[in-house]
Amino acid sequence: MVNFLYCVKSMNENTLNNNSYNQTDYSHIHFKLKKVGLRPTKQRTFVASLLLNGVNRHFTAEALQAEVSQSGITMAIGTIYNCLNNFVKCGLIKHVETNCEMTIFDTNVENHYHFLDEETGNLTDINAFDIKLNKLPTIPEGFNNSGLDIIIKIKKINK
């Protein structure tokens, strides 16, 4: 709740209280958020409207903040991260573990894997059916398999 209050206190004329937010119909976004148990705050609703539009993409919180800013709205990076982390917990988006310095999120929540361009940090989706696994190791006692992430690191060939 503190982050929400901070965000409200730090808002200026170009915030989510502006006319562009109030004149947009977000009922479909509110439905999606409520369906997964999230309260549709203005911040969550606006961020969700950018991400849950049916277009799969990979992004960082910082890139999303730039996109929010380009739309004329001011939102703290902490608020963006809070929204994204809540979306991950509810299964609306995924967090991709890349071992890079940045946190990358993915709007494609279907079973799939990734190519990681080591030079640019860009991710490219790989269909799960394009990778064949014959055998997985036995899961240690006391643990459950919570998922399988495959990232194939790639570099351009220098000619």
Image (tube, rainbow, N blue to C red):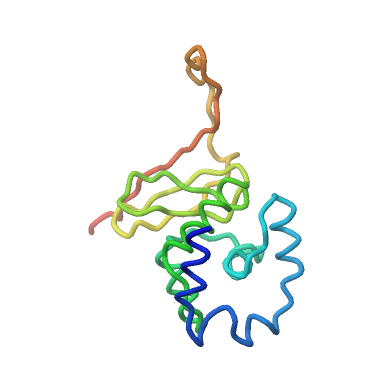
Most distant residue in the left direction: 159
- Residue at 48 percent of width and 83 percent of height: 12
**In this picture, residue 156 sits left or right of residue 28:** left
- Residue at 33 percent of width and 44 percent of height: 99
Identify which residue, 152 or 93, lies in the foreground.
Answer: 93
- Measured from the top left, where is residue 153 in percent x and y? 35, 45
- Residue at 67 percent of width and 58 percent of height: 39
- Residue at 56 percent of width and 44 percent of height: 112
- Measured from the top left, where is residue 15 in percent x and y? 53, 80
Quarter of the image that includes the C terminus: bottom left
Asked if residue 92 is positioned above or below residue 111 in the image, the reply reads: below
- Measured from the top left, where is residue 32 in percent x and y? 72, 58
Identify which residue, 1 or 101, lies in the foreground.
Answer: 1
**In this picture, residue 38 sits left or right of residue 79:** right
- Measured from the top left, where is residue 117 in percent x and y? 35, 54
Asked if residue 76 is positioned above or below residue 132 in the image, the reply reads: below
Asked if residue 44 is positioned above or below residue 11 in the image, the reply reads: above
**In this picture, residue 149 sits left or right of residue 110:** left
